[in-house]
Image: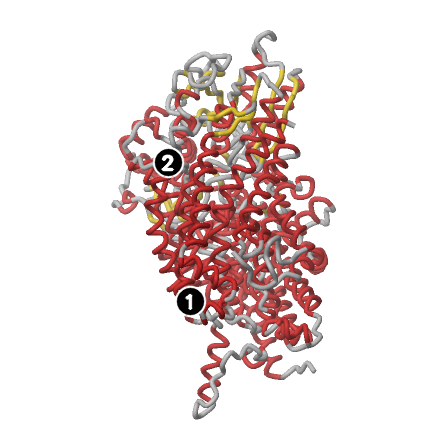
Amino acid sequence: MRTVTVPGLARGLGFTALFAAFPFVFTESWVVNIGIFTVMYAALATAWNVLGGFSGYLSLGNAAFFGMGAYGEAILFQHISIGSGYRPFWVLPLIGLGVAVAVLPVAWVAVRTRAATFAIVTISMLFIAQQLAFNLHSLTNGAQGLVMPLPPFPNTTFERPFYLAMVAVLALSVLLSWYVASGRLGLMLFAIRDDEDRARGLGVHTTYAKLFAVAISAGLTAMAGGVWAYYIGFIYPQFAVDPLVTIGAVLMAFLGGRGTIWGPTLGALILVPAQQYLAFSEGASELYLVAYAAIFLGVMLLMPRGILPSIADLVAARRSSNGAHRADGPRAEMPEAVT
Amino acid sequence: MVACRFPDERGVVVRVASHKVSLAMAAVALAVTAACGGASGGSSSGSTKPLVIGISLSFSGDFSDPGHAAELGYKLWADQVNKQGGVLGRKVQLKIVDDASSPNQVVTNYQTLISRDKVDLVFGPFSTLLTAPAARVAARYGYAFPEPSGGGPLVFQEKLGNVFFVQPAPVVNCGDPFVSYILSLPPSERPTTAAYPELDDPFAEPIAERARLKFEAAGIKTVFKEVYPPEMSDLTPVVEKMAAAKPDMVFAGTQSDDAYSMVNAMVQLGFSPKFLFQANGANSPVEFPSKVGAKNTEGIFSCGDWFPNSKAPGNQAFIKAYIAKYGGTAADIDSGSAEAYAVGEVVSEVAKKTGKIDNATIIKTLHSGTWPTVEGNLSWDKYGAPNGSTMLTEWIGGKLLPVYPAAVALHPPVIPKPPWGG
Amino acid sequence: MHLVVQAIILGLLTGGVYALMASGLTLAFGVMRVINVAQGAMIVAGAYVSYTLFTDFHIDPFVSIVLMAPAAFAVGVLLQLVFLRPLRSDEREELSLLVTWAIALGIEGVLSVMYTTTYRATLPGYVNDSLTVAGYRIAVVRLVAFGISGVILLLLYLVLHRTRLGRSIRATVQNPTAARLLGVDAERVSAYGFGLSVATATAAGAVFGMVEPFNPGSHYDLISRLLTIVVLGGLGSLTGAVLAALVMGVSEAVLAATISPTWSSLVFFVILIGVLVVRPQGLMGATERGRL
């Protein structure tokens, strides 16, 4: 059922290659530094999209997974001393899996609620996670924070390993995104998004579908958090588990087109540099927050489906020559169409 | 639910620094003095090139108030130095950018300042939370990192040779003068029991814990110890439990808001211990009396690294210059400005002593000797922890005064603490 | 035991204020199925306005509530018209969450610029006074705050049950289609309902500013608690919100006093999870739209 098309494959590999080549072309440290954060957010947004975009269940607690990944890395070093160098990267899949499994019990409670309550519950989960980070002193060192070992990479290409690690996480996210969307799980999630009661009535195992999506989303987000932890080197509860991380990822997914494969990445590519420009011109003041809010509102109100779907609509509208059939509420469109 | 320690977290979403070019002085034509010919200058060609110093400060987010205070201090120093011809004949130009109280941003900022803008030197940001990651970035590039406010243990645990915490003592030692003072009292005047309310914070809690261990070793019994979270804005429950234990002495590991809240709760509950020490909050010369009531401050101890009456070298000149540039009175000066000013002083002194102003020289030179600043005479160990100690301050007659050790005291300590309201 | 009872008293007083803060939130959801994440920010904004009126013009906080109410109502109506009405009704629930979150960020940004991040508190003359009743200390400020909250909640109740607008609102909550058939202009009711919820938010803010120090970032902490309260009480149920607020207030205070303050704030969420496992619709909510 899952078809790997040549154009699709070419796109996937092509983009990945482009991303990976970036630091070798633009070698300046500060540029790669920005690239790291951009790719990180692309991965976060793509991971969020698996649950939020495909199923319509807006999770606002993804930052908790991010923090779990970050702390996972740090704890592995503090308590088990895995050593440094490249090892923190090799343990990433382990962390991803670990977090994905660990969130299942709590996720089970959450996904049994309906959409509005679910969003609020995820916010609560976020706060619980932060609270735990502050309070479980023996594990997380509480407010004192945890330290990652000093990376031994040479100074001129210091950022490169981190950047490439983020690209790997992004590639994995996109791959999993595509895999889910083009398979049965994707169908179930889209059905849930359209009309959950009906889906359930038709025999779709909605709870398991949602759980699976949460697990995937959580694992990927945690891996991004792990790379971040190693890059920044210091993990404090309030920075590792931060609602603005979620908000950023969500906004980017919305902007680019939730429910699509590359939409979230597009959103990140637009927003992260745009934020830089705003910070540059608005400078040192909280007016920044206002500008951010304005963009957010603009996207919500003017382009609620995001860029990629809107472009696809335009294209489709133009194709149907006498405009007979506007793509009205095409919520069930398959992502391939707009990748 | 520390959401709003969330607010620190502004800008986890990436931003690149905004560039705030500060000094008009810097635009002034480069004054070439005789010194220019001799000094080999800093990083590059031309001894009359301005000395560009990159700094990341928090102008938004949780650290924005101290961020502004530090900015005033840095700018004042640059002003003063340029009035006298600059450092080794080079005019100082400060390049200050905003990190929005975010560690991601502070890393980006120092990266950009160093690798793109190629500043000659860097000075530190506000707070250990931001200093720790930033110091690593600077270390990678071999830049010296004198910084005004990153004094938490994490900074020194990094074992970086380029860090210099420009204050008299590491933050966690701030209770030491109080401990010495109490233990210097004859046993009949000493407290026999002690309570330790502690804010869950990387600095406040260690300060109290360090003191507690010392007091316990000296035989002062701990009848209460509790850690409370930062978002607990009403400390009544904690204070109630503490009052029920009837301690002679309360040693509180506090920052500012919880210190005010604690005193307010104690006043409301009518609990007035014989000895009350608050690590922070009570050392705010203007905020503290306004938040708890001027009549309630009497007899409360705190720690201090700087304040207007201090006899530290150059302090009076600093205050005069500050008032001349910014107005107000000495009481309005935030210690953060003095700390930042001291960072600049230290660098000027290296230049004066060695005739050079590059990063390697700074790093090598500052690790030995004692350096006079408005924060006192400072010296550092090899990982940047200062070797001195802070002083004990106390509110006496509505004023915050240093009372111990005797060498720096402006008034002997007053004990026991009088009841609330006078 | 004394400690526990003292904690219960404190918890009830605090819970009353939370009840007022949560009432607007649950009202907005009930009427329009809008999750107003900006409620916390509006409360903080109300606190700032009241603070300014008090510090600069010496206007008593209670009076400031009366002054703010009409303006807040108008702002609420405006917000609803501009930002919430354009959302498609089938997506409104979820999107409203994000839209209002953006509004909250905007409010926080503006407040940060105007007031900086220094913590403020409205400190009336009686801020340090306390009464002793049967051996228990009650801070006057908290008692006053509780009293004001109670009065405003009562007013809200009266509006909802004794005025035409109130009846229309309740009708829309219970059954929008039927309400429409009976001539209730759902759009207008939604706008007024939101206006009402913002007005209660600013009133709650004035009260909040008296008992706790605040800065622009305080809204995160607030909204997380309020959302929890509202979910616990059942989205859309005013009685549920009040009950849940009191339960939360007492639980947190008792836990802080008996076990430890660091873990006490988790109690909010633990209770929430516990209830949701058993009853996903909350204490008083129904699986369909409920009653106010």
Which residue corresponds to the image point at 27% horizontal and 47% vertical from the top-left? Answer: B27
Question: In the orientation shown, which residue stands out farthest toward the left?
Answer: B29
Image coordinates of residue C63 in percent, x first then y, are 34, 40
Report x, y in % for residue B75.
34, 39
Image side of residue A84 versus residue A126, left or right? right
Tell me the colour scheme of the image: secondary structure
**In the picture provided, is A237 more to the left or to the right than B56?**
right
**Depicted A16 relative to depicted A150: above or below:** below
- Residue occupying the far right of the picture: A80
Q: Quadrant of the N terminus of chain C?
A: top right
What is the distance, in whole Å, between disc 2 and disc 1 at their CAs?
63 Å
- Residue type marked 1: Val
Q: Amino acid at mark 2?
A: Gly
Q: Is residue B241 in view from this perspective?
A: yes
Query: Residue C184, labelled with which disc?
Result: 1
Relative height, residue A48 to residue B409 (above, below): below
Chain ID, mark 2? B
Q: Which residue is mark 2?
A: B73
State left or right for residue C287 relative to residue B49: right
Look at the picture and state if B369 lies above or below A31.
above
Q: x, y percentage for residue C105?
A: 44, 54
Callouts 2 and 1 in the same chain:
no
Q: Residue at x 49, y 61 (%)?
A: C34
Side (left or right) of B52 relative to A218: left
Q: Which quarter of the figure has residue B243?
A: top right
Which residue is more in the foreground, A210 or A48? A210
Q: Secondary structure at mark 2?
A: helix
